Amino acid sequence: MDTNKNSYRKQSFKNYITIIIIVILLMGFMLRIIPFLQGYTLLIGGDAKRDLVQTLYILQNGAIDWKDSYGAFPVLHLLVATASIIFSLDPELVSSFLPQLVTVLGLVFFYFLLREYFDLKISLLGLFFAAVFGPTIWWSAQGVRETIGLALLPLQMYFLSKSLKENKVLHFICLYIVTIVLIFTHHWATFIVIITTGIFILYLYKRNVKAWAYFFSMLILSCLWWLIVMPFLFHLFEKALLIASTNPFLIFILLVIVSILFLFIFEKIKIPSQTYFSRVIESITTDSLIFVLFYTSIFCIAVVLLTFASTFLVFEYPIQEYLSIFALFYLSGIGVILSLIKMEKRGYVFIFSSIALFGIIISGFFIGGNYVVFDPLRVIEFLPFYLAPFAAGGVVYFYTRFLYERVNLLIGLLCILAIFGLLIYPPIFLMQEHLNSENIFFDIRDYIKYTPPEGIAALDWAENRGIYLYSQNYEHTREMDILFFNIEPLSEGYLSSVYDNIIMDSKSKIQITDISYWAYDASVLIGKNKVYSNDWGDIYV
């Protein structure tokens, strides 16, 4: 009888955990389709539209456009095209929710990975962080090739861990399959995986022949494919090194980071267990109030310093879009400090991978204003897969320090984190109205990434009359590429909108040097005839 009761309790507990995981995944999915839920009918961002063009190419020709730099990484395009055929759905509609769904399903394997190294509380909270982290939400929501990369990264990490721990053939087969798919998904996601995989093997399995065989096969295959389809990537890498070499401070920081990594990896610095160092950490964290005040003060100083680095990003982002990043860093810092007391050796791989990514991010702050070379926010989106367990440790720390209302504190904190993640969106997608450019929450992306109903009407008017439009906002020109895919336009025209003036007036908030958001100079409109006009824009031919 007791055995049956215990079995029932265990099953009930498993069901309870399953429900929690499903709720987290549903929340993550909903956060990634906010524009779609708000009724927005266009894809967000020029990259998403270029990817849709490649999907249309596959549907039209039954083949992949390998010559195109986007078509050379066809996993997303094949996925959307296949789903579109099977379910008889419009491919643009499928692109609005299927990649986002795949990304969320990838988080299931992230949870499995966390359970390999951490307890249940840390694993569930770590899953929550990955589901609601702002930059990850933003890039997942756009439905680009990178979105699938965000799904495959935890899958690769999971099978890598299982393969090397259990040495089963099936796990290695799954690992190689996932890796090959990843290589054909997105070059940037693959680059991140190569770096973190190298750290994982160096630190835990540096004498494992199979591990090194896997690593070098992945590295060689990736580089060969990049060399074949995107040789300019190597020129960009050379350009990035040239820019970095002119920043002595950057070189110094990167040398320090690399030195620390290798000293730990080759065990020249011993991992602290119950040493004097650990006892010091334990003593300073005993008095919760003093520790939190001291740590918060240091963190605030770091945030102030980071505000200067933000001038190197592609856009000048408003403060609300940094909240999710600050929350992850703040809680992760506490989690890392506490983990140093009694962390197992394998847990350090997550820290070392985070340090490596921080090195890339720091490099991006110096060269990231040049968008074609690097955008540091496209690294930060991967950070939850390495920092989430430590951020979860930070949450547990605060939870255990409260004697009363612990559950309410936890629920409130998780709700705040979810709201912070939601605020990564430009305000127009949340409020359905624009903010004044003088408002501290103003986001220039409101006018770049969003096209209002009047704008959609203007684009539809041009499509119905066979007019291919050039817009000062290249997002609209990308939309015309979709509308006129495999259709020869009868004529060409120019779109001018009130958004263009606002963007030009706020041009200081766009820090891109190698590409422009403006496809033509306004002087070309001189002598043109206005053939369409509404409250938002005019069309000239």
Image (cartoon, grey):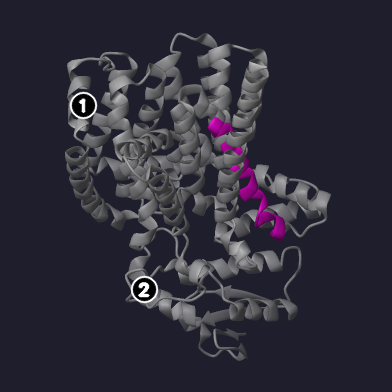
Of marks 1 and 2, which one's residue comes earlier in the chain?
Answer: 1
| The quadrant where residue 330 appears | top left
Looking at the rendered structure, the secondary structure element under dot 2 is: loop
**Could you tell me which quadrant the N terminus lies in?**
top right
Q: Is residue 363 left or right of residue 208?
A: left
Q: Are marks 1 and 2 in contact (CB under 8 Å)?
A: no
Q: Above or below — where is 96 with respect to 153?
A: below
Q: Is residue 374 visible?
A: no
Q: Is residue 305 left or right of residue 70?
A: left
The residue at which mark 2 appears reads as 506
Asked whether 234 falls inside the magenta stretch, the response is no
**Could you tell me which quadrant the C terminus lies in?**
bottom right
Residue 104, horizontal then vertical, whole percent:
59, 44
Q: Is residue 513 left or right of residue 12?
A: left
Looking at the rendered structure, the secondary structure element under dot 1 is: helix
Badge 1 amino acid = Ile
Badge 2 amino acid = Ser
Q: Nearer the viewer, mark 1 or mark 2?
A: 1
Residue that lies at the very extreme toward the front in this rendered image: 1
Residue 322, horizontal then vertical, whole percent:
36, 55
Identify the magenta region: 92-111
Residue at image coords 64%, 44%: 102
Residue 284, horizontal then vertical, whole percent:
18, 30
Residue at image coords 53%, 35%: 190
Residue at image coords 36%, 32%: 356
Mark 2 Cα shell of 10 Å, populated few (<14), some (14-19), many (≥20): few
Disc 1 to disc 2, C-alpha distance:
47 Å
| The quadrant where residue 506 appears | bottom left
Asked whether 98 falls inside the magenta stretch, the response is yes
Mark 1 Cα shell of 10 Å, populated few (<14), some (14-19), many (≥20): some
The residue at which mark 1 appears reads as 281
